[in-house]
Image (cartoon, rainbow, N blue to C red):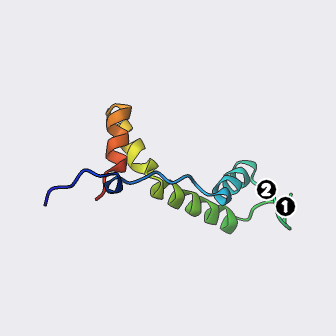
Amino acid sequence: MAEKSSKYNKRRWSVPSKRAKGYAADRKAKVHTYGPKEGKELTDYEAGMRSGYLQCQTDHAGIYKYKKAISEGKSKAEAKAISQKKG
C-alpha cells in the first residue's frame, strides 16, 4: 500500500516538556534545582530516573532518528525527512 501524501502522514516533532527542561538542569547541576528538595544532591536513583525520562523525550521527539541519520552522513534535509517518516 503506497503512502498518501498529506499533512497528517508526517510525524511532528514534539517539543520536550517543561519537566524535561527541569530534569536536564537537575542532571547538569547534580542537585535538585526546584521543589521541596531544592539544593540537595541527587541520589543515583533520581539521576537515573531523569536520564531515562530525558531519553524517552528525545526518542519521542524524533531526535534519535535525526541524529542517527546525521551521523551516517546524510544532509540535514534528508535527516529531517527520515525523522518525520512513520514506521
Numbered badge on residue 40? 1
User: On the rendered image, what quadrant is the N terminus found in?
Assistant: bottom left
Is disc 2 surrounded by few (<14), some (14 to 19) or many (20+) residues within 10 Å? some
User: On the rendered image, what quadrant is the C terminus found in?
Assistant: bottom left
Residue 31 against residue 70 in the figure, above or below: below
Q: Nearer the viewer, residue 86 or 5?
A: 5
Is disc 1 surrounded by few (<14), some (14 to 19) or many (20+) residues within 10 Å? few
Which amino acid type is marked by label 2? Val
Looking at the rendered structure, the secondary structure element under dot 2 is loop
Which amino acid type is marked by label 1? Lys
The part of the image, by quadrant, that contains residue 17 is bottom right
**Residue at x-position 38% and y-position 37%:** 70
Residue at the far left: name it.
Answer: 1
Disc 1 to disc 2, C-alpha distance: 5 Å
Left or right: where 27 falls relative to 37? left
The part of the image, by quadrant, that contains residue 41 is bottom right
Looking at the rendered structure, the secondary structure element under dot 1 is loop
Tag 1–tag 2 contact (CB < 8 Å): yes
Q: Position of residue 29 (x, y in %)?
A: 75, 49
Q: Position of residue 32 (x, y in %)?
A: 79, 59
Q: Nearer the viewer, residue 83 or 71?
A: 83
Q: Nearer the viewer, residue 70 or 27?
A: 70
Q: Position of residue 71 (x, y in %)?
A: 37, 37
Left or right: where 78 falls relative to 32? left
Left or right: where 34 falls relative to 2? right
Residue for badge 2: 31
